Amino acid sequence: MIEEKKKRYLSGERAISDGKHKTLIDVLLEKHLETEEFNEEDVREEIFTFIAAGHETAGTWVMWAIYLIGQYPEVQAKLHEEIDHVFGEDRERPVTEKDLKDLQYMDCVLKECHRIYPTAPILGRNATEEMKICGSTIPKDATCAIVTYFLHRDEEVFPDPEKFDPDRFLPENRVNIPEFAYIPFSAGPRNCIGYKFAEMEIGTIMCYIFRNFTVESLNKVLPVPCVSLQASEPIRIKMRPRVAHQS
């Protein structure tokens, strides 16, 4: 695909993108062909990262979110109420960017799900210089493991950390969370390339599910750290069609 788009662009046959909106490949190829900042290998690596890293992690986030929401009927009821307020009786209308911005409680729910069960439980970083952290010396070039699973359970930042409480991320409470205390997508210049896309993707999926269904978690599972945070056994969920929306 990359080669075909590149040949068309260089031959002057047509623009890289034929539609109104550019894809990620379009943007990266234009950067590669019009400047010297990106070579072709860079384009391939960025696309591979976006697809490969985004597929499993997105599915894992959805899995844990449904599992948690299915255990807390009171949270699910508030979620249904907000979704019904935004969409009314229309269960099929496509989700827009404005809808996702309006669904503020759903945003809190998804952030709390990602706090308790971060899809990437461990992040790796290389120390570019020697530094001291909490009295310990980290030598230059040391490989450091940042365990987000435990970072997100810091009692000084998240009181009663094992409690599922989406209200932690309400605007008035979110301001009390330090910038690097909650990093499900990592942080800094090496953070997740697709985190904005992931947030919109997961939000859209949740809208379609909870506009139409009530979910109930049927078993308890334990988190198992791997490349992404997996469950100790298959998660069993009962999904019931919603007969009528609450007004």
Image: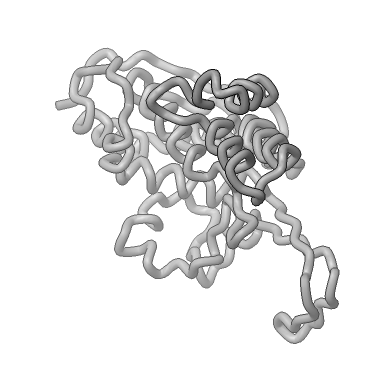
Which image quarter is the N terminus in? top right
- The image quadrant that residue 221 belongs to is top right
- The image quadrant that residue 45 belongs to is top right
Q: Position of residue 50 (x, y in %)?
A: 63, 36
Identify the residue at image location x=51%, y=38%.
198
| 136 w.r.t. 197: above or below | below
Q: Nearer the viewer, residue 168 or 232?
A: 168
Any part of residue 224 in sight: no
Q: Position of residue 135 (x, y in %)?
A: 75, 86
Q: Is residue 146 left or right of residue 238?
A: right
Q: Position of residue 130 (x, y in %)?
A: 80, 80
Identify the residue at image location x=76%, y=61%.
145
| 100 w.r.t. 233: above or below | below
Which image quarter is the C terminus in? top left
Any part of residue 127 in sight: yes
Colouring mode (rainbow / by chain / secondary structure / one colour): one colour
| 193 w.r.t. 213: above or below | below
Number of marks present in the image shown: 0
Identify the residue at image location x=55%, y=42%.
194
Identify the residue at image location x=38%, y=62%.
174
Q: Is residue 102 left or right of residue 150?
A: left
Q: Nearer the viewer, residue 110 or 234?
A: 110
Give the farthest residue toward the bottom: 135
Q: Position of residue 71 (x, y in %)?
A: 47, 35
